[in-house]
Image (cartoon, rainbow, N blue to C red):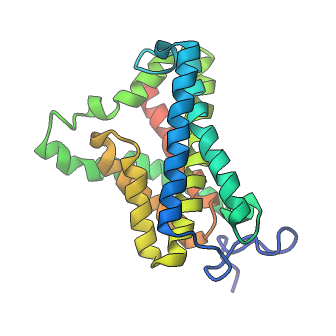
Amino acid sequence: MSNSPWGPPAGAGFPNNVFSDKERVGFGLGFIVIAWIGAYFASTVLTVVVATIFGADNISGDAAPTWGFALAAVAMWLPSVAMLTIVAKRGASKHFAQEFSLSFKVGDLAGIPIGVASQIFLVGLVTWPFQQMFPDAFANSKLDERATNLVDNAAGAWIILLAVVVAVGAPMVEELVFRGFIQGSLQKRFRHGTALLVTAAWFTLVHINPIEFPGLFAFALVLGWCFKKTQRLGLSIWAHLAFNATALVLVSIR
């Protein structure tokens, strides 16, 4: 029988590139919450500092230029990456990639169709009941508003920067934080299903916009399953990348 394309990497590389539950240090829920809140607070402060320097209108709001949006995103991400770096030093491996299961295999490219299908079919399917009950609140124009504004403000070559931020940077940082750190640690302390659900809810709520919650929660479950299935971030990162990129493409062609 051939090996699964999602199995642990063999051959050269780190001896424990994928940690089993026994090998992984599972940080407690209190530690996870404090670490995340600290990073979130630092992100907020850094974003305010950047807004003060470059002007709030330039990095926030519907009319913010793409460079401002990218600058704000980096300001949000840097504290999270710093937090993860500190956390990794407290882990079993002391190695960033190992601690958060950051590894890829060719089979992880299956995440691309998973992400595309989730954006095209899953989001619409889970949002449809809410559109029937609350047609005004869940109108398609409101659901697409955030992506539409980003694309409309990305004139010319700025669309490339937008794609890098939305389809590359965001998936990498968010998967490291939510699947690599939060879900990876919680599944050591709780059942895998519980860790998946808690992480999915957490991921959904931090995106703030309630009309996006049904679709985001459904997709977060998909991402959680990708991590639970492989115990690596490769599959979920590709799925997340494809999901975000598909959203940009769909808005661009409408």
**Residue 102 visible in image:** no
Using residue 129 as the reference point, say whether residue 27 is left or right of it.
right
**Residue 197 visible in image:** yes
Q: Residue at x 27, y 41 (%)?
A: 211
* Rendering coords of residue 192 (x, y %): 47, 76
* Rendering coords of residue 248 (x, y %): 48, 32
* Rendering coords of residue 222 (x, y %): 45, 60
Query: Residue 99, relative to residue 38: is it above or below?
Result: below
Q: Quadrant of residue 132?
A: top left
Q: Residue at x 28, y 52 (%)?
A: 125
Front one among 181 and 41? 41
For the C terminus, give its image quadrant: top left
Q: Residue at x 45, y 18 (%)?
A: 152
For the N terminus, give its image quadrant: bottom right
Q: Residue at x 48, y 64 (%)?
A: 30
Using residue 124 as the reference point, say whether residue 110 is left or right of it.
right
